[in-house]
Image: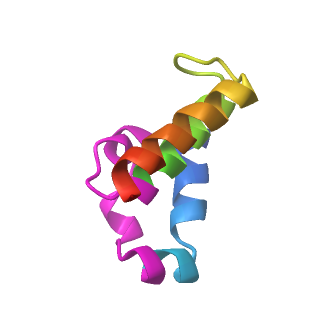
Amino acid sequence: MSNEDKMLQLVLSDNNLSSFYEYNAADYQSVLDALQSDNPVVVAVAKIIRGISGIGLYNGNKKEIYNEVFNYLNQNLL
């Protein structure tokens, strides 16, 4: 299990977050699993973790990560 996957498990295991957004953290063993989720919050968490770890399109650029997650959530939650 990678550090990204461990961070994902730590964040998704938060009881308040999981109960409010209705997901089961055990369903997402890796960041790749979470990125393919139907739950926008799970995907957003995975995008943040992937972005800050320097993997992917934005290579740790916080402003670009913020923009990507903000736009994703606007398109999928509103």
Task: State the residue at coordinates (36%, 77%).
Answer: 22
The vertical placement of 61 against 33, above or below, is above
72 or 26, which is in the foreground? 72
Q: Would residue 1 appear left or right of 64 to someone viewing this image?
A: left
70 or 62, which is in the foreground? 70
The vertical placement of 71 against 51, above or below, is below
Residue 2 in view, yes or no: no
Residue 21 located within the stretch drawn in magenta: yes
Tell me residue 54's x, y (percent): 65, 22
Tell me residue 70's x, y (percent): 56, 43
Q: Which residues are magenta?
A: 19-41
Task: State the residue at coordinates (45%, 58%).
Answer: 41
Tell me residue 46's x, y (percent): 49, 44
Disc tally is: 0
Task: State the residue at coordinates (73%, 30%).
Answer: 62
Colouring chosen for the image of the structure: rainbow
Identity of the residue furthest to the front in this view: 78
Residue 33 located within the stretch drawn in magenta: yes
